[in-house]
Image: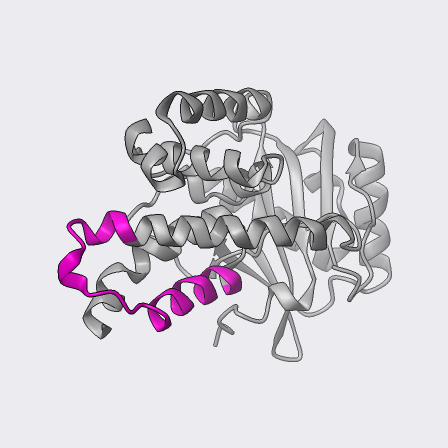
Amino acid sequence: MDTLYKTYQPFLFSIAYRMLGSVTDAEDIVHDLFLQFKLDTEQIKDMKAYLAKMTTNRCLNFLNSARKRREVYTGPWLPEPRVSETEQPLDKVVTDETVAYAFLVLLEQLSPVERAVFVLREAFTYSYEDIAEMLEKNEVNCRKIYSRAKRKLQNDMPVHMEDAEHVETLAKKFIKASTTGNFEEFLDLLTEDVVLVTDGGGKVRSALNPIENKRRVSSFLKGVAAKGGFIGDLLPVMVNGQEGILQMKHGQPIKVICFELDSNQKNIRKIFIVSNPDKLNHIPVPY
């Protein structure tokens, strides 16, 4: 069983994380799957496909119950970010834009079944035949679900960030602005219709609705800075494989900040700030 776990855990985690948008819940789902695994492994012809099916269905069950919890969540619900100090593959099995933070935010628009079909097709390039077998649906139905999901997302699909240096510059300018309180240089990098989304989960103070347009975002950031909201260490880190910022205070992570760029990959069209402590306690503390 240990060998099975070591072999398939990274792959199964990568499915569960894209499905759930939560590091903690994804780890729990995969861990529990192996804890409860009692089948004779010799009876299973394709172990990888079988475990992928089991994981996907557990995620669907979880999402169906989580939707009710998220409906009563205080303020916007954002995914748990995966943070590392240096650029490295987030999962050895699949590393692409389908694990980018903005992509995970976008997936929240989909129903659990739409999300399952879309993730399996888009991120893992499963055939419709395989997806139908995993979800116990017919192939035609899966094609329709995928098309519906794609239509829902097509206007907002995030741009895959090719220019890592530019994103790094944006992060550094945000750190400089937050430290000095002078945001003008950073604000020049925002689109006019920029949206800032904060997730404090009712545990820490944050905006209860997304903040829209450059003027309002500017006022919000300056207000947070004036009240000492950016005091502490602001560190450039990798957030879901792209440059972002980790704020540390008294040795604890208190905010993760990351960006989504516009179609020209020059200006910021979305800012995400996660400060709900429950979504930060899995982050390794930098030394």
Give me the residue at 62% from left, 47% from top: 173
Please give the range of residues in magenta: 24-50
In magenta segment, residue 37: yes
State whether residue 263 appears in this view: no
The residue closer to the viewer here, 223 or 140, is 140
In the image, is residue 155 above or below residue 183? Answer: above
Of all residues, the one furthest to the bottom in this rendering is 250
Q: Position of residue 274 (x, y in %)?
A: 66, 56
In the image, is residue 53 above or below residue 128? Answer: below
In magenta segment, residue 159: no
Q: Position of residue 237 (x, y in %)?
A: 50, 58
The residue closer to the viewer here, 53 or 269, is 53
Give me the residue at 58% from left, 27% from top: 262
**247 sits to left or right of 103:** right
Give me the residue at 47% from left, 43% from top: 100
Q: Position of residue 30 (x, y in %)?
A: 39, 63
The residue closer to the viewer here, 32 or 169, is 32
Give me the residue at 53% from left, 52% from top: 61
Please name the predominant secondary structure of the magenta segment in the image: helix
State whether residue 188 appears in this view: yes
The residue closer to the viewer here, 196 or 24, is 24
Q: Position of residue 216 (x, y in %)?
A: 85, 37
Question: How many marks on residues?
Answer: 0
**168 sits to left or right of 129:** right
User: How are the residues colored?
Assistant: one colour
Which quadrant of the rendered structure holds the N terminus? bottom left
**194 sits to left or right of 238:** right
